[in-house]
Amino acid sequence: MNSIYFRSFACWLALAALGSARAEEWEELARRLEAVSGSLGHAYRLHDDGGRSMDCLEIFQVGADGKQGAYGLYHTQKGGVFSVHLAHSSDLMKWRHVAVLDDHASQATICATADGGYLLSYEKDAPNSCWIRIRYCKDLGQLRAGAFAREFDVPRSLAPTAEGTPSIESVKWEGGDLSRSEIALRFHYFKDVRVDQLARGVLSGFKSWKAEPDTKINRELRSRGWRGNLGDRTRFEWRSEPYYLQEVQRRRGDWKSWGVYLCDGDGMPLRALDLVTHAKAGAFCNPNARWFIDPEGSRKLAVTMFLPGEGSAPSESGQLLYIIDPDG
């Protein structure tokens, strides 16, 4: 056999084997994500100690050992007004309210910075419009007090009325100086004042914003039949490989058609998740997945999703949280 051909063939076999191994990994991940009813622990209709619904919950921890418990970022609605809140928990099942972070605000996400601070981003609303707000808190104490050091309202550039559901992709800066920073986001924009589509942008120096539609991912999801809104997403790792959970809607205006797609590290779809809850809920949105250290010092994956009332039993509609043991 020609030596060049042999090396090419061997390379192809190696790549095929690698691709097969990765496919097995994400298929395993998909099955673990789908089995809500078989998870290590779960909670439906999650509320804090003040009775507030913890909608679109995102979990984060301080420190590497988990001894300080976990914090939760979420929104709730009262009198038609959304507000973003912070709570604390030692076991992820019971939550103590800490602070209101902003009113007329929802869909919050957070990222720790190298200087010990936090970047907080969320959807800010006013009558007939919404936009993305970014805040910088210099430390945990400032965050817990509902205060901040810097704030920037991202100007809409892709849609005339609505851009939101931000996720922080990366943060680069020099010496903790926001004027020399680059903050990359993914978000949605209300295309043609008709349907939410995916986009990404970069905030440079905490003052200059540039954004563009995520055309390739939008096109691929639409080709698979998801022609409603494309919105919230979360990035996480499994077996050292990056993945996304992506919120998708099959039909615009149909809350029962919300679902979640498992996507690769670029956000390209792998397959829709067929999630199985105890009461067989049929609609899922606002996915989030975060690793945490439990009180015994073990690493677990906390997954949260919002279950719309239109597609769920009354016992399950609202905020869902469940826990996956990677070794279980």
Image (tube, rainbow, N blue to C red):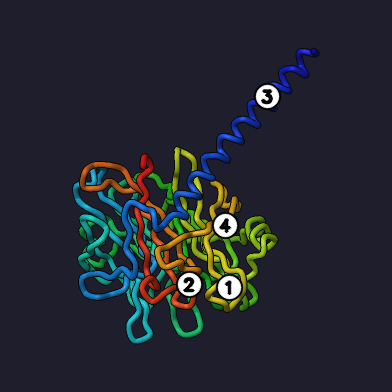
Which residue is denoted by mark 3 in the rendering? 11
Circle 2 crowding by C-alpha within 10 Å: few under 14, some 14–19, many from 20: many
Report the residue marked by disc 1.
Answer: 190
Looking at marks 1 and 2 on the same chain, the residue that comes earlier in the sequence is marked by: 2
Q: Secondary structure at mark 1?
A: strand
Q: Position of residue 63 (x, y in %)?
A: 25, 45
In the image, residue 194 lies at what x, y percent? 62, 77
Quick one: SS at disc 4? strand
Residue at 20 percent across and 65 percent down: it is 96
Measure how far apart labels 1 and 3 are at the Cα level.
Answer: 45 Å
Q: Which of the pair 20/99 is nearer the observer?
A: 20
List the residue tagged with mark 2. Answer: 131
Three-letter amino acid code of the residue under disc 3: Cys
Q: Amino acid at mark 1?
A: Phe
Reading the image, the residue beneath label 4 is 272
Q: Is residue 290 visible?
A: yes
Q: CA distance from mark 4 to mark 2?
A: 29 Å
Callout 2 secondary element: strand
Task: Between label 4 and label 2, give the one nearer the viewer.
Answer: 4
Type of amino acid at the residue the image marks with label 2: Trp
Residue 201 in sight from this viewpoint: no
Between the residue at mark 4 and the residue at mark 3, the CA separation in whole angstroms equals 31 Å
